[in-house]
Image (spheres, grey):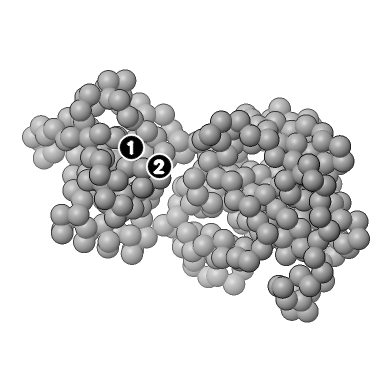
């Protein structure tokens, strides 16, 4: 924007804080930042995208305006690119837990990989979808005997040079195998079925990596038990031991609203009651997407994005009363 945002109070970290980096959260962050505000974007996972990235990045979605039959991963990639050059701070692996008043703004307490952290902002937009997508537990025989069993995708550089066994057929397993192999890990990818999931490009790269020996593919295979040094598998009816310094059990994610349902928003089951502009019972706290009661069962990307845009513009006016709620037409503006 050509008019810079006045400096927010020094005790605040940003003008607006968005909880959730799914489609609604990403679009809310864009609109608030495009209006000239500073934005903090929190998400419990290690990557943006919410359900589209965690549950079905390889599937096509047909109801996103202007993107016919687009792979879900491509929809998220476009929303992320739209934030380029805007004042948005990313905080992934960050689970929002508490909400407390902070003068005329709000204080959000969260847990991160480095421990508890508090964020302060003038307004909060809740766009957490079905809740934080947390990894399923590693319920496999012998999980308590191996020294390093994980259920989520780590930083690839952290495991460079290690023997890594990845168990799972979800798209994250395919992507993790490729990224870890490229980072220098010795990777074995296994699944109880013959096929893996991923985009055509990822599956092609996986096949090439397996053929060249860059990584090992064992599928279909059955994980018999984990051991202190790796795992015992059954491959083509024959027992096989695999060495593994780290074992990744990637079985997808389950949504959890528990941390947010302590927020005093008058919850109606899984929904937050909202009024005009996504306003909640708390001044300066807005809701958009699947959590908004006004949307009811219309859990559609297009609906969530519309709610996000409206909520973001109302949040902008709340933080900066000199900014009108209506943003005007984007074709009449440009990013500075």
Left or right: residue 52 compared with residue 228? right
Is residue 272 in sight in this rendering? no
Q: Residue furthest right?
A: 322
Instruction: List x then y, in percent, for residue 84.
Output: 60, 65
**Residue in the image at 33% along x and 64% along y:** 201
Q: How many marks?
A: 2
Q: Are marks 2 and 1 in contact (CB under 8 Å)?
A: yes
Badge 2 element: loop
**Residue in the image at 46% along x and 47% along y:** 55
Q: Which residue lies furthest to the bottom in this view?
A: 332
Q: Nearer the viewer, residue 107 or 205?
A: 107
Task: Give the residue at mark 2.
Answer: 154
Task: Give the residue at mark 1.
Answer: 248
The CA distance from mark 2 to mark 1 is 9 Å
Badge 1 element: strand
Instruction: List x then y, in percent, for residue 174.
Output: 32, 51
């Amino acid at each position: 924007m050509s008019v810079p945002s006045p400096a927010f109070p020094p005790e605040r970290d940003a003008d607006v804080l968005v909880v959730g980096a799914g489609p609604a959260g990403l679009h809310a962050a864009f609109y608030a930042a495009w209006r000239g505000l500073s934005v903090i974007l929190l998400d419990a996972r290690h990557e943006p995208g919410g359900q589209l990235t965690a549950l079905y990045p390889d599937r096509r979605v047909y109801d996103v305006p202007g993107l016919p039959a687009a792979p879900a991963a491509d929809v998220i990639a476009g929303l992320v690119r739209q934030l380029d050059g805007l004042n948005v701070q990313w905080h992934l692996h960050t689970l929002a837990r508490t909400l407390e008043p902070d003068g005329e703004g709000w204080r959000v307490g969260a847990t991160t990989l480095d421990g508890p952290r508090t964020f302060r902002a003038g307004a909060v937009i809740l766009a957490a979808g079905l809740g934080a997508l947390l990894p399923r537990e590693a319920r496999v025989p012998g999980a308590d005997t191996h020294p390093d069993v994980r259920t989520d995708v780590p930083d690839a550089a952290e495991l460079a040079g290690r023997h890594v066994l990845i168990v799972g057929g979800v798209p994250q397993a395919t992507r993790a195998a490729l990224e870890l192999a490229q980072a220098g890990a010795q990777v074995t990818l296994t699944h109880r079925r013959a096929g893996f999931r991923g985009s055509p490009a990822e599956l092609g790269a996986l096949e090439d990596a397996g053929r060249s020996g860059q990584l090992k593919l064992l599928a279909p295979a059955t994980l018999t038990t984990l051991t202190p040094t790796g795992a015992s598998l059954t491959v083509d009816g024959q027992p096989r031991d695999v060495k593994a310094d780290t074992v990744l059990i990637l079985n997808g994610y389950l949504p959890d609203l528990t941390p947010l349902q302590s927020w005093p928003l008058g919850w109606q089951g899984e929904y937050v009651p909202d009024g005009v502009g996504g306003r909640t019972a708390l001044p300066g706290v807005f809701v958009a997407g699947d959590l908004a009661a006004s949307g009811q069962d219309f859990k559609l990307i297009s609906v969530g994005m519309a709610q996000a845009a409206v909520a973001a513009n109302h949040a902008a006016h709340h933080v900066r009363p000199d900014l009108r709620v209506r943003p005007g037409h984007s074709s009449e503006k440009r990013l500075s």
